[in-house]
Amino acid sequence: MSKIKTLSALKKIVESLKKKNKRIVFTNGCFDIIHPGHIKILKDSKSKGDVLVIGLNSDSSVRRIKGRARPIMDEKARSKVLEAIELVDFIVIFDEDTPLEVIKALRPDYLVKGEDWKADKIIGREFVKKIFRIKFYPGYSTTGIIQKIRNG
């Protein structure tokens, strides 16, 4: 069974899981080139609840946020890589610049973001019970990896 769901299908799944008292955790990102920093975010996110939902920026969303040279891998490839990671329960691709509409529709219990986000600036915070801000894995970023490849 595919972990990649439409928002409407995922909304029904999440509602059903909540009735079974499952704690839904949501995090989001581009997940362009998976690196140890991404794995740390996924591990930390999954540890906060029972079901981990990933909001994945679509290709057009990534281009608007990161520039014309990104993403390196298209949304189909990025979602397939995430789907193979056992920590991830569901993936929903969104086309907007932020996951606000996804968060509003799913109303997860917990929202996980990196520590670089100030709590009062986290998109969707009003639709969740709790926000977790997690530390980054130092020395890893997709942008840094791309620059290292380009510079040889």
Image (cartoon, rainbow, N blue to C red):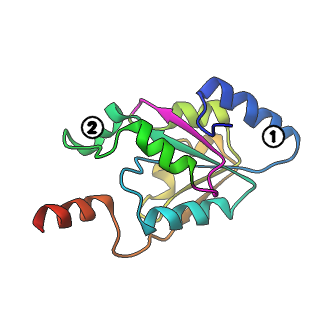
For label 2, the residue is: 63
The residue at the far right in this view is 20
Magenta residues, as a range?
85-96
Q: Which residue is mark 1?
A: 17
Q: Amino acid at mark 1?
A: Leu
Above or below, comparing residue 138 to residue 32 in the picture: below
Query: In the depicted view, which residue is nearer to us: 40 or 99?
Result: 40
Residue 87 in picture, x, y percent from top left: 63, 58
Q: Is residue 45 left or right of residue 145?
A: right
Residue in view at x 69 percent, y 61 percent: 48
Residue 35 rendering spot, x and y as whole percentages: 41, 64
Residue 30 in view of the camera: yes
Horizontal side, residue 102 vs residue 56: left or right? right
Residue at image position (19%, 43%) is: 69
Say how many tags the image has. Answer: 2
Quadrant occupied by the N terminus? top right
* Element under disc 1: helix
In the shown orientation, is residue 79 left or right of residue 49? Answer: left
- The span from disc 2 to disc 1 (Cα, nearest Å) is 33 Å
Image quadrant in which you'd find residue 10? top right
- Position of the C terminus, as image quadrant, is bottom left
